[in-house]
Image (tube, helix red, strand yellow):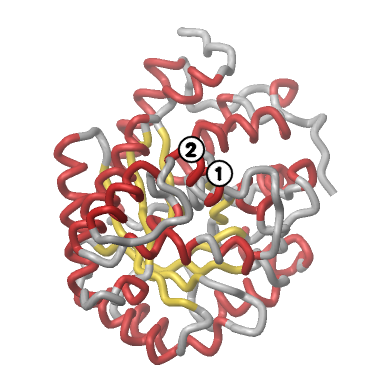
Amino acid sequence: MKKPPEISHDVVHALPKVELHCHLDGSLRPESMIELAQEDKIKLPSDNPDDLKKILSMGDKRGSLNDYLAKFEVTLTVLQTSESLTRTAYELAEDASAENVRYLEMRYSPILHTKRGMTPQEAVEAVNKGLRQAEKDFNIKCGQIICGIREISPEVSLRLADLAVQFKNKGVVGFDLAGAEENYPAKHHREAFYLILNNNINTTLHAGEAFGPESIHQAVHYCGAHRIGHGTRLKEDPDLMQYINDHRIPLEITLTSNYHTRSIRSLKHHPIFFYYKQGIRITLSTDNRLISNTTLTKEFMLAHELYNFNLYDFRNITIDSMKSAFLHHNERKKMIRVIADELEGNFGLMPEYLPQSYTSEKVQTD
């Protein structure tokens, strides 16, 4: 039997991966932003790619979720045409594929791309065009998640939910509620989720990131969430945490962005390892590759360096991520088999769990 390699950046980079929580408008290439701005005569804070990246990336800075979201005001200026959405969707899929992401769910809100006359329907079609071309050119499968926005009216969320229904099985795989949590409860948008659930569409909600576990409670019990975006504060409600675990509702964990938005005290105190040891289904994602200056490889390496996650843990997380994907069951099964075979054949990662002594018992979080 092939012996698993030692963990390194190159090994983790080569692992087959699954990314379920990635925002298109937070993951642009600075070089592309500058070219798009020049084409559409848009003024950016800088015309130098390195400087623009420094301006738009949080770096070592931390702020509120609202501070983090303010960065999108710049990226969205260059995403107001069909051509820009097609290009950036394609490039994001290309960037993900370059680190062996086999399945990517890309999310965005079409309503935020209408300032120059593009309709929400045209936005979805443009993103679809970019993703379908990427699937032909790279070894990746993609789906798009349409986001309602908490601080925009529930009526708009309902229209976006109807848009998701229109594009069900036509590129759209799910519906989300994003934006500022505090003072914008998910339950106000429950009519949109009623429409989504009654049309058998998958749903995930940002919750428990900038507000407490009651936000997660609303996401699950008012809006029928099949997954939770972030969920860092779930541990504050043990009974709800048990319910999440019992019902196998996955948490979409994004380590670096959780640090940037102050949803955790420090990276050392992120509850990811605690959740993992409880048996809660967790996934790892980037959230915003540009704004948090990260890749999925970097997120995996953080999990290893800070919490001693090993290759077998990464195997579990990747398989659980694929199980949690908004794909039809038979498609998931096929992709899981392909990924599992690669993990076994190329990396010696057999499905059996290793002895307890190999796992990360020494790591503690509080």
What residue is drawn where x is 59% and y is 27%?
A: 353
Residue at 42%, 56% in the rendered image: 44
The answer to whether residue 205 of the structure is visible from this angle is yes
Marker disc for residue 164: none
Proximity of marks 1 and 2: CB atoms separated by less than 8 Å: yes
Q: Can you give x and y, in whole percent of width and height, for residue 250 in the image?
A: 54, 56
Residue closer to the observer: 5 or 298:
298
Image quadrant where residue 338 sits: top left
The answer to whether residue 330 shows anywhere in this view is no
Left or right placement of residue 92 versus residue 297 in this view = left
Above or below, 95 against 173 in this view is above
What residue do we see at 68% from left, 22% from top?
355
Residue 177 relative to residue 210: left or right: left
Where is residue 314? Give x, y as percent: 54, 32
Name the mark on residue 50: 2
Is 45 or 151 nearer to us in this picture? 45
| Residue 343 in the image: above or below residue 283 | above
Label 1 secondary element: helix
- Mark number for residue 54? 1
